[in-house]
């Protein structure tokens, strides 16, 4: 009986050792991010996962929608918005101070080849030109309003989209002749759109904040040398 008990104990010990050698389930974090960060953050997540073993799951939307969802209790580990004012409306407690990780500018996007010959903001007011913008409550819409006011131009958009990628999509599909988006959105669209400089564009500032300790690693990665290199490749300006 004693020998049998010893044998059973040895088998249990071997089984335990085998289990400890198995890989642990991969951790996953959820990041709420502004729609204009879609392509850059997808690349950031791949690099971060390779470095840390942490999988990043995203929810992309207009910054104002993200903050509203978080204030209503939506679960997330970190958040990144396209302006500091919107992040400032967050009522949930942060795990630490927010960090500016990138900046951006606006451009006018047109159909490929710019068939309507749109060269300045004033051209957006011409009869027959269909323009779409982001809603003023969206950072991209707020920045576009500032740019048009600085150019002393009043535009009557056909529609107001709830995020900047909605503006880009309508121009890509030919549902609008022009729209105002970020430089990075035009870059992501490639040959699907044309881009016209908008000299009166303000500088968009992108902050990120961790909502818990799990999200802090991703926020830190964004401002690291590796994270900044990826953002630059997607057309973002450095934070300073």
Image (cartoon, rainbow, N blue to C red):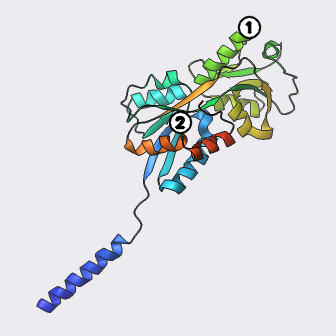
Residue drawn at point x = 42 percent, y = 39 percent: 76
Residue 132 image position (x, y, % from top left): 71, 22
Foreground of the two, 217 or 79: 217
Q: In terms of image quadrants, where is residue 95?
A: top left
Q: Which residue is mark 1?
A: 152
Height in image: 137 above or below 165?
A: above
The C terminus sits in image quarter: top right
- Is residue 1 visible in the rendered image? The answer is no
* 75 displayed left or right of 13: right
- Residue 33 has which mark? 2
The N terminus sits in image quarter: bottom left
Height in image: 205 above or below 42?
A: above
Residue 24 image position (x, y, % from top left): 40, 63
Residue 74 image position (x, y, % from top left): 41, 35
Q: Secondary structure at mark 1?
A: loop
Q: Secondary structure at mark 2?
A: strand
Residue drawn at point x = 70 percent, y = 25 percent: 106
* 138 displayed left or right of 215: right
* 122 displayed left or right of 157: right
Residue 55 image position (x, y, % from top left): 49, 52
């Amino acid at each position: 009986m004693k020998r049998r008990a010893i044998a059973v104990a040895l088998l249990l010990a071997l089984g335990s050792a085998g289990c400890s050698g198995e890989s642990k389930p991969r951790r996953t974090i959820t990041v709420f991010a502004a729609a204009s960060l879609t392509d850059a953050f997808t690349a950031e997540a791949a690099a971060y996962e390779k470095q840390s073993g942490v999988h990043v799951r995203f929810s992309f939307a207009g910054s104002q929608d993200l903050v509203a969802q978080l204030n209503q209790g939506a679960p997330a580990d970190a958040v990144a918005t396209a302006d500091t004012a919107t992040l400032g409306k967050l009522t949930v407690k942060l795990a630490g101070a927010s960090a500016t990780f990138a900046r951006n500018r606006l451009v006018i996007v047109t159909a490929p080849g710019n068939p309507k010959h749109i060269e300045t903001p004033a051209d957006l007011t011409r009869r027959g030109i269909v323009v779409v913008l982001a809603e003023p409550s969206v950072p991209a819409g707020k920045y576009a309003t500032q740019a048009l006011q600085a150019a002393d131009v009043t535009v009557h958009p056909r529609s107001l989209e709830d995020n900047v990628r909605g503006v880009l999509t309508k121009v890509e599909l030919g549902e609008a002749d022009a729209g105002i988006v970020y430089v990075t959105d035009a870059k992501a669209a490639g040959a699907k759109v044309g881009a016209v400089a908008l000299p009166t564009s303000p500088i968009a500032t992108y902050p990120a904040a961790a909502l818990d300790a799990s999200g802090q690693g991703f926020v830190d990665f964004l401002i690291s040398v590796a994270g900044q290199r990826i953002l630059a490749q997607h057309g973002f300006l450095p934070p300073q």
